[in-house]
Amino acid sequence: MMAVRTGSRVMPALFFEPMLCETAERPPEGPEWRYELKLDGYRAIGFKTEGQAQLWSRNGKDFVRRFPEVAKAIASLRQDTAIDGEIVALDADGRPSFALLQGSGTAATSVVFYVFDLLMLRGKDLRLSALEERRERLRKIVDSLPEIIRYSETFSAPAATFVQVVRENGLEGIVAKRARSTYRSGRSGDWIKWRANRGQELVIGGYVPASNTFDSLLVGYYEGRDLKYAGRIRAGLVAESRRALLSHFAGLSIERCPFSNLPERTKGRWGEGLTAEDMRKCRWLAPHLVADIEFLEWTPELRLRHPRFVSLRTDKDPSEVVRE
């Protein structure tokens, strides 16, 4: 397949760069907004062309071999049709579990593809059509597809009510979309995401070693071309996740600290600072890995307060990680 270059990345020529959400402290309210559950999985675009199924991650990685059953179901689409959604692993209670999605293949886990948008139908580009029109066509298409592909429902409840339901059921959050919005690649205020637990993806730039494993992760975000240190993560790092992370560290070691705002003069009010003395204990990594981190809040010094490691996100491009 031909490829095209986007910035520093090489994308397949038939890849649809996805529309992304902006982040908000609360879901927006009003009659123009439609609400969906925020699903904790891998964003993916399925496309059938020339009689073959294609499945791409949000940054253009081929997902066909990783999720063969999803790809097989996409082959049931009409020719030259593209759908957008989230690949999710469901636990025994039917709840999305990103840990299961990372640790298991489709043979061991109930993996489904929740779709929420229709980008192309039989060769006709629908991205300039209104969201409601695209979704109306999508629902009819999903009804005829294998069960592994499911329609991501919208909810008409008031935002405050939906927030309460999400919190009570331990779900990740809400995505709000303008009913008349077109589909535009990149981030847009027409799509808004709200997380029940504050958190975001951050880039791993180093770690603090401990005997044959490591004590904590050092993470940050990009501000222009500069990687800014945001905090040290220890909570949430169980033995299994430490072993998995160590395997990803291989070959990424570098001599120089990748964070542009280190060292710090003091440890700060909450003890989150990293001084020159502290840095002597650190090991640095090329910033190629992205982790999903939850935390209580950002401090006035733009450090994470009470952060906790959730998972490694191999589907995220480190260069796109900014402070949300």
Image: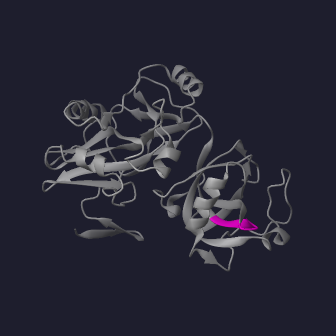
Q: Quadrant of residue 33?
A: top left
Q: Residue at x 58, y 48 (%)?
A: 200
Is residue 225 visible from the viewing direction of this image? no
* Position of the N terminus by quadrant: bottom left
Q: Residue at x 45, y 49 (%)?
A: 104
Is residue 196 visible from the viewing direction of this image? yes
Q: Could you say where residue 41 lies in the image, as x and y percent from the top left?
A: 45, 45
Nearest the camera: 28 or 175? 175
Q: Could you say where residue 42 lies in the image, as x and y percent from the top left?
A: 43, 48
Q: In this rendering, is residue 12 above or below 183?
A: below
Answer with left or right where residue 14 lies relative to residue 92: left
Farthest residue to the front: give it: 108
Q: Residue at x 39, y 33 (%)?
A: 178
Q: In this rendering, is residue 81 above or below 313?
A: above
Answer with left or right where residue 220 lies relative to residue 11: right
Q: Could you say where residue 37 lies in the image, as x and y percent from the top left?
A: 45, 32
Nearest the camera: 217 or 231? 217
How many numbered marks does the figure carry?
Answer: 0
Answer with left or right where residue 268 lies relative to residue 44: right
Mainly helix, strand or loop, the magenta region? strand
Nearest the camera: 107 or 124? 107
Q: In this rendering, is residue 127 above or below 317?
A: above
Q: Could you say where residue 245 lies in the image, as x and y percent from the top left?
A: 60, 61
Magenta segment range?
205-212
Q: Residue at x 52, y 62 (%)?
A: 318
Whether 235 is among the magenta residues is: no
